[in-house]
């Protein structure tokens, strides 16, 4: 098969994309469930709205034109009268009003308990509610001013029964209740509130029955007389002081002394009329929904104009403000869009819910080391980032588009009234920020469980805090806007703020029968701040995530720049040869290992001839908690040509895995280097990965992908395409015995341990990599599969260099061309299995079991046969001897044993040639003895 060369960026991206799509297809149901969440929430909103509509908006009590006339004790309506266009300020909002009623213009006066009593000397009038209403005057000409102020109020109530509006225009009527948002129905008249007629003098407790409005909307009320007192002030400054001191918030003693109105006549004379009017505008605000209430100013303007006219022309002339009347309007159906009001909380949850999904998917690949294994098979950082990002963005956008379509389809004003382009851009930006944040945050978690829990706390916490804290503060107009901006830097709050603005615009638009947010409202809706915050944070999060990923994949601590540079690492302890002066072992280390070292030094001049060259590779783990640093690999030199399988034996913890991790780029060597195909593992790892295969010690597989899909994915990463890919996958599956019985198409999560192992080996070999590392490939396999696997490996090694670690001597002997025994971070010996056996196993092993009193005799007998024999083991009559091959002949041993048998009972005996296992145990033991004190 021709070498297809390293895969291009698009090929790798394609491989990852296809894998992700298959993965999502497997998780179809959880995806459907995810998409259903916005659907359910929208339905809940619609349900709440319907409930609200039937109970409140369209309830019989609130039907247009019906009015409750008699209420029973529980507040329920007993008798209703219908036939009006509208009958309450609430109804006036939504009912159709083709010919609005005329209402008398009222003067806004302070409530009885807060009227100015400073001139009276005592405040006893407050208890009876009969305090006078104060009106202040000032101007340049005192005498003119006094005349005008005297004309302001009429001295007695003049009533014309046949024309009530004229009557109310001729008299000064006032109220202390707020006006409404519209003038369709004045609450002062429609509700049970007093109406005052203001006169210079009053008979105490005088009232007068009066009816307001036109048929059919008539209200019977009583006019209460209240005294109006005009006071002259010398300058407008004094008027200001007077008002300020009486103002509730301006006065420390809590004495409220409010005035009804103030007039500054300025330079008014008989030719000019020039006036400044003070009025109380506090009533304007105070609504939660930022609707602006009307102010009762017209009557105040009319009063002073009328008074001036009378000053000029005498009491017979008048300008009358007879009535005020709203414009006609059509009916609007829904008044209170409750769904829009609770929308921000729901939709914050809906959108934030994607966060745990993305985060756990990223952390899963990290936790299962799938990210690193993909990297080892040639998937670079750039395609991984790009595809994952694009992929999450697509999923998120689909999700939000579904939400918008659902919401619009079931007629939620939240979606329908606001401009779709603003909504789309807002969600798009926020989702980008959310994905970038997930990448950033994923570097802080290593467990899917913790990350999921934390993410859900974030989701629900943000929604609730948004509702109860942020929204509360936004509505409190005295809270500094700067702080709100600061709070919105928290991503959950910027989302909440954006949705809150949408909801407010939708609510108001619906109420007024207008559109919601449009681009022209953009800058005065605080939406612009939210957009800026999101865009800036998005870029920052991307940069930070990229930076942290780079740092952590290069093995450094993320916060390395915060580390104390003056803190010393404990000094390295050198192995001290003197303390364990075993000459034998020192020499043993020298011979073959030194030869290999020299060979590597030669090769370093032209390293590309060998597939793998390690030059004096060292790994030191820094000391922790006062322990000295640990030498995991101490100066390893090794060269493996293509076509060779190098076996690495060694006890657990000897440093084999550290070595493989360095060669596969998981760890950076402390010193020395390794070259793969002439490429340096410290600098060129990305290129090394394109021709490398790894079978890790623990199977790194996606539970839901099938064996075939795994191989297809990794095959594509190795740049196999089309029929070549299919064929390679097919062969691969057959060779590891996963082809038959549909095993290849079962999810890997259902495989037995052995099957997973075989799949891992197949993955490491697909695409004919130049270098393959296998960490204990056959652990957990039954003998038949193991044989099978060996054949596969043997076939694969023809043009590949394989480094294989194993605990099975049989495997090592069968597969490996050369073996190295690795003890405590260093190679103890190196050579082909036969050589090693010959070198270290130059002896027979004789085992003999007798009763224990014969031990001495047996030992003596062996000494006779072989003077240099060593007893290596004895317990309760069983003894083991090592007999050097050069001084014994087997026949002599047999004769000696026969002779012994005739003298005493020999329970059992045996003579064996050394096995690789003996070599291993011997080398490992001496190696460890050598290193134990270092
Ligand atoms: C003030 O107004 C009166 C008319 O009421 C006028 O006769 C008088 O000249 C004015 N005084 C000044 C200083 O303009
Ligand atoms: C009362 O009003 C009617 C209608 O405007 C008018 O004709 C009549 O003269 C008025 N009566 C008085 C006493 O002003
Ligand atoms: C206002 O001015 C008049 C005359 O100019 C003076 O008599 C009076 O004391 C002044 N009032 C106040 C409160 O200053
Ligand atoms: C204006 O009216 C409000 C509401 O009644 C009141 O609290 C406030 O003190 C008034 N302001 C002045 C200057 O009188």
Image (spheres, rainbow, N blue to C red):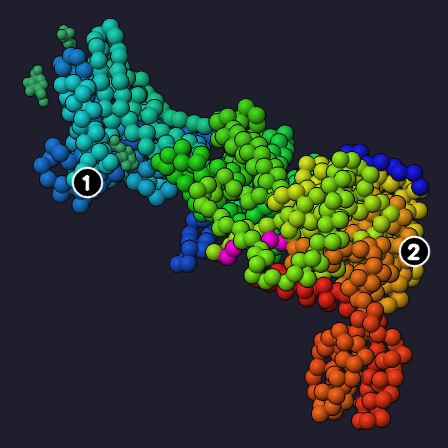
Which residue is drawn at the image coordinates 70% and 43% (left, top)? 615
Counting from the top left corner in percent of width and height, residue 504 is at 51, 37
Q: Disc 2 marks which residue?
A: 734
Quarter-wise, where is residue 757 in the image? bottom right
Report the magenta residues as a range: 627-632
Which residue is drawn at the image coordinates 70% and 64% (left, top)? 924
Is residue 266 located in the magenta-colored stretch of the structure?
no
Q: Secondary structure at mark 2?
A: helix
Q: Quadrant of the C terminus?
A: bottom right
In this view, 873 is above or below 59: below
Any part of residue 734 in sight: yes
Which tag is nearer the camera, tag 2 or tag 1? 2
Any part of residue 337 in sight: no
Quarter-wise, where is residue 259 in the image? top left
Q: Disc 1 marks which residue?
A: 254
In this view, 274 is above or below 181: above
Residues 864 and 180: in front is 864
Counting from the top left corner in percent of width and height, residue 158 is at 25, 28
Counting from the top left corner in percent of width and height, residue 672 is at 66, 42
């Amino acid at each position: 098969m021709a070498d297809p060369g390293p895969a291009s960026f698009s090929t790798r991206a394609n491989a990852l994309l296809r894998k992700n799509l298959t993965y999502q297809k497997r998780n179809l149901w959880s995806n459907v469930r995810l998409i259903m969440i916005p659907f359910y929430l929208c339905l809940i909103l619609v349900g709440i709205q319907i409930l609200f509509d039937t109970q409140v908006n369209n309830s019989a009590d609130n039907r247009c034109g019906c009015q409750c006339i008699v209420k029973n004790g529980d507040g329920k309506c007993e008798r209703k009268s219908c036939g009006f266009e509208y009958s309450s300020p609430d109804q006036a909002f939504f009912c159709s009003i083709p010919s609005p009623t005329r209402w008398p213009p009222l003067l806004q006066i302070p409530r009885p308990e807060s009227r100015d009593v400073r001139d009276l000397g005592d405040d006893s009038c407050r208890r009876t509610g009969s305090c006078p209403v104060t009106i202040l005057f000032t101007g340049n000409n005192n005498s003119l001013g006094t005349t005008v102020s005297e004309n302001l109020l009429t001295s007695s109530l003049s009533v014309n029964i046949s024309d009530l509006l004229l009557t109310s225009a001729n008299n000064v009527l006032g109220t202390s209740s707020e006006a409404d948002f519209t003038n369709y129905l004045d609450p002062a008249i429609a509700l049970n509130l007093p109406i005052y007629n203001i006169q210079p003098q009053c008979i105490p407790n005088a009232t007068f029955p009066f009816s307001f409005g036109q048929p059919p909307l008539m209200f019977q009320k009583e006019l209460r007389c209240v005294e109006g007192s005009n006071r002259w002030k010398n300058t407008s400054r004094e008027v200001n002081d007077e008002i300020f001191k009486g103002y509730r918030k301006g006065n420390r003693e809590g004495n409220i002394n409010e005035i009804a109105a103030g007039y500054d006549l300025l330079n008014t004379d008989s030719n000019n009329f020039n006036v400044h009017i003070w009025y109380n505008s506090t009533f304007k605000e105070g609504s939660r929904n930022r609707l602006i209430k009307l102010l009762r100013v017209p009557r105040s303007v009319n009063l002073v104009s009328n008074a001036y006219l009378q000053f000029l022309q005498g009491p017979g002339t008048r300008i009358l403000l007879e009535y005020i009347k709203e414009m006609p309007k059509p009916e609007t159906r829904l008044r209170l869009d409750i769904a829009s009001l609770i929308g921000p909380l729901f939709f914050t949850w809906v959108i934030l819910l994607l966060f745990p999904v993305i985060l756990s998917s990223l952390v899963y690949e990290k936790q299962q080391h799938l990210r690193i294994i993909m990297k080892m098979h040639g998937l670079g950082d750039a395609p991984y980032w790009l595809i994952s990002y694009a992929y999450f963005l697509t999923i998120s956008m689909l999700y939000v588009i579904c939400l918008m379509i659902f919401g619009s389809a079931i007629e939620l004003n939240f979606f329908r009234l606001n401009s779709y382009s603003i909504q789309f851009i807002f969600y798009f930006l926020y989702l980008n920020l959310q994905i970038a944040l997930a990448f950033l945050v994923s570097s802080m978690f290593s467990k899917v469980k913790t990350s999921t829990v934390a993410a859900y706390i974030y989701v629900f916490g943000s929604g609730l805090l948004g509702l109860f804290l942020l929204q509360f503060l936004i509505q409190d107009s005295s809270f500094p806007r700067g702080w709100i901006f600061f709070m919105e830097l928290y991503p959950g709050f910027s989302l909440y703020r954006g949705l809150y603005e949408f909801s407010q615009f939708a609510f108001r638009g619906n109420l007024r029968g207008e559109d919601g947010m449009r681009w022209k409202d953009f800058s005065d809706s605080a939406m612009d701040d939210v957009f800026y915050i999101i865009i800036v944070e998005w870029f920052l999060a991307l940069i930070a995530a990229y930076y942290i990923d780079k740092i952590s994949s290069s093995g450094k601590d993320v916060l390395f720049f915060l580390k104390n540079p003056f803190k010393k690492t404990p000094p390295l302890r050198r192995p001290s040869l003197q303390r364990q002066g075993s000459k034998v072992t020192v020499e043993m280390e020298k011979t073959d290992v030194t030869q290999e070292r020299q060979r590597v030094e030669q090769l370093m001049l032209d390293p590309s001839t060998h597939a793998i060259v390690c030059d004096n590779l060292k790994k030191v783990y820094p000391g922790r908690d006062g322990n000295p640093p640990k030498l995991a690999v101490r100066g390893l030199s090794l060269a493996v040509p293509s076509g060779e399988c190098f076996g690495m034996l060694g006890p657990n913890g000897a440093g084999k895995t550290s070595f493989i991790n360095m060669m596969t780029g998981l760890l950076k060597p402390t010193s020395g280097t390794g070259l793969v195909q002439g490429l340096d593992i410290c600098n060129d790892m990305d290129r090394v990965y394109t021709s490398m295969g790894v079978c890790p010690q623990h199977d790194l597989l996606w539970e839901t992908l099938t064996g075939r899909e795994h191989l297809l994915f990794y095959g594509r990463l190795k740049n196999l395409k089309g029929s070549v890919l299919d064929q390679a996958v097919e062969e691969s599956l057959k060779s590891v015995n996963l082809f038959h019985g549909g095993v290849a198409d079962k999810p890997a999560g259902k495989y037995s341990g052995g099957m997973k192992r075989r799949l891992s080996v197949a993955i490491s070999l697909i695409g004919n990599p130049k270098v393959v590392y296998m960490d204990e490939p056959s652990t957990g396999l039954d003998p038949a599969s193991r044989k099978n696997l060996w054949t596969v490996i043997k076939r694969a090694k023809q043009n590949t260099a394989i480094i294989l670690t194993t605990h099975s001597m049989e495997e090592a002997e069968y597969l490996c061309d050369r073996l190295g025994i690795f003890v405590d971070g260093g190679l103890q010996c190196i050579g082909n299995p036969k050589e090693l056996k010959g070198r270290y196993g130059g002896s027979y092993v004789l085992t003999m079991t007798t009763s224990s009193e014969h031990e001495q005799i047996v030992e003596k007998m062996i000494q006779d046969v072989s003077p240099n024999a060593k007893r290596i083991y004895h317990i309760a009559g069983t003894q083991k001897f090592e007999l050097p091959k050069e001084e014994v002949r087997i026949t002599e041993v047999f004769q000696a044993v026969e002779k012994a048998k005739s003298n005493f009972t020999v329970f059992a005996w045996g003579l064996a040639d050394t096995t690789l296992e003996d070599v291993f145990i011997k080398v490992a033991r001496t190696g460890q003895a050598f290193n134990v004190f270092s």
